[in-house]
Image (tube, rainbow, N blue to C red):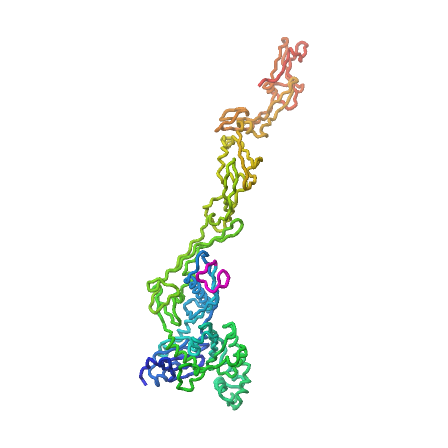
Amino acid sequence: MTQQVTNDLIFALDIGTRSVVGLIVRFDGDTFSIIDYEIAEHKERSMLDGQIHDIEAVSLVVETIKNKLSIRNGVLKKVAVAAAGRSLKTKRVTLEQPLAGHSFLTKDEVRSLELSAIGQAQKELATEQSEIDLSNYFCVGYSIVNYYLDGQLISNLVDQRGSMAQVDIIATFLPRIVVDSLITALHHAELSLDMLTLEPIAAINVLIPSTMRKLNIALVDIGAGTSDIAITAEGTIIAYGMVPRAGDEITEALGQAFLLDFSDAEIMKRSLSHKDQVTFADVLGMEHTLPSTEVVMQIDEDIQKLALEISNKILELNGKAPQAVMLIGGGSLTPQLPMKIAQILNLPDTRVAVRGTDAIKNLEIQHEIVSGPEFITPIGIAVAAKKHPVKYITVSVNEREIHLFDLKKIHVGDVLLHAGFDMKKLCGKPGLAMAIKVNGIMKFIPGTWGEPPIITLNDKIAHYDDLVHDQDHLTVIPGKDGSPACPTIQDVMENIATLDIFLNGRLYSVPPLFLVNGIECDLNTLLHDRDEVWIRLPRNIQEVLQYTEQLDLVEVEELSYTLNGQVQRWERYSIEFKLNGQLALPTSLINQGDHIEIHYHEKSNLMISSLIPEGERIQLDTEVTFNGLKIRLPIIRTKITLNGDIISEDNPIHPGDKIMIETIETTPPIFGDVFRIAEVRIKKPDPGSRLKLLINSEPADFGSKIKHGDRLELLWEPEEEFSISDPEHLEVRHLKN
């Protein structure tokens, strides 16, 4: 036949690990029937765990089925296929996001948090698979496990307000390589992809309609290499999973037990479900006929392992035993498997059942052979292709074309994720916070909240939840980051009362004192990260005067002069403080309601003598006796100049005076120096007498050196006898100043 397949016919392919099933299904309103089918097994292990490993080999099997069906039903050009549920990757992540604190969460912000969590799951999944391009994974669904606000479980974040939001999600992804390899294999077989679905979805669509999905049901598709699991509850599919154990493990167990090659063991396995006894020849050529029950007993341990792994996976995905378990796929015919699963899950035997095509409503079967559980998925693919088609859609994002599979309703957020946008970076980041220690307590000052992105869909403002259709175009402008925290002292100031005191009889309310890193500042001082701020009331009289700006109550006049080249200042007034009537110091502590009095007194004139250090006042002298009179001769003295003139230390100082004070050491004294100190009056004796000088009774002259304690004498050497001590002839006394 060369006629074209009509529009009411669907060509569906179930490309499995062991075999490929092709169906031609006719639809008549809500009723459909299988009008033709073909089954072909892979000649080699060209598929593993639902993933095509040898595209050429798989395409040859597909082409064989297509050609046989085309001969009987007309030319086949398009086909509906399913991506294996075992290829799905499920990731659970928890994501936290700090909040502005002062605003309520909008629906868009909550959706952004969810999408950020999906993006995180996508990133973690890509990292685990050593992938760089995040778009290699389609998100085919996700569910919210829990929301949290400030660490507390909450049912809905919208319109809530707090400091930290958290979402816990389970997201499911389909690797792009699975889809790409399917499309390539079809292309080699000269077929184009008409529609795509997922195997668990396909099976559930025909076995568990939406009206039944409120029930907690586990659907297990037991194939050759893996057992795929999908679980329904709350009206949707809540989880997918896979166990890497299925029919091939039972086949291999039979081969080990009865010395059979794999193909013969496979034939024996299929006979066990509908024959009371089986006949087979082992690898030695010996024929055997055994009851099916005896054969099953030999592989009981392997059946138990398969049942245990499937049951444990169901418990892991569902968190508890489901209400019922449906088994489909060729491996579901394994003897005693339903009963063992029921026992492990603690369910009645009637709650675990193998379902065949007879369980599908509105299905007319024209071929008895397609009534078994292995045909559920292929029929589901055809039904999904008609009732729930999945096609490519193309969306422009910032003028770049993005291709997506329409596995579900596509929203703006889904497109942005697939386009590679980091959802956390789309929203402007909050400005950097700042840590400030205030009165010993660490405070965190947040920056301003980042701005949301501007998203337009077909030139209209859009939100993450808006639906996207084929040929739509999106424009995305990332939000701007918030500004870093820029607080002043006023922003971190605590409620501190004023200090009320009386100053010279007047009431003052003194404001707090502000110190930043030990330096006094005002309220408008900008703070920096890790600053230490102290805010307190004034503690003593000095701080009160400073912060009430009352220092001008004491008019202190200063006298400025220069001493030995250094400018000096002297206050003309002395200040006296009284606190509650008692003498006090500027550092005296004060309390609320205290009375402070300030008095000042004028000082006497500043004299040069007050500037001479005590050590420099002492003059060193040499003491001698001169004719019995004690004489002091200075050997070190102080020299004082005022504005260049030598003066005594009794002069007063005036503003602007330039004073030099220095110490001068004189030469050692001689006999003649005593005449600068002493006055000698001698009556001249009779003629012929001559003057004589003695030091310690030894002859000397006016230049003879003298030392401390010497005894000096001045006398006439008489020509006639007379007394030298006669007051009429000699008188010695100190010179007057």
Q: Main secondary structure of the magenta part?
A: loop
Left/right of residue 432 with respect to residue 610 in the rendered view: left
Which range of residues does the magenta coloring cover?
A: 148-163
State the image coordinates of residue 507 (x, y, percent, origin top left). 50, 38
Q: Quadrant of the C terminus?
A: top right
State the image coordinates of residue 350 (x, y, percent, origin top left). 51, 81
Residue at (31%, 84%) from the top-left corner?
Answer: 2
Displayed quadrant of residue 604 = top right
> Does the rendering let one see residue 567?
no
Give the mark count. Answer: 0
Residue at (49%, 60%) from the top-left corner?
Answer: 150
State the image coordinates of residue 215 (x, y, percent, origin top left). 47, 75
- The extreme top residue here reads 686
Residue 154 colored in magenta in the image: yes
Q: 722 above or below 8?
A: above
Q: Quadrant of the N terminus?
A: bottom left
Left/right of residue 499 with respect to residue 365 in the rendered view: right
Residue nearer the viewer, 395 or 249: 395
Q: 690 above or below 140?
A: above
State the image coordinates of residue 385 (x, y, percent, origin top left). 38, 77
Residue nearer the viewer, 31 or 24: 31
Left/right of residue 110 with respect to residue 702 in the rendered view: left
Left/right of residue 477 with respect to residue 587 in the rendered view: left
Residue 189 colored in magenta in the image: no
- The extreme left residue here reads 3
> Does the rendering let one see residue 409?
yes
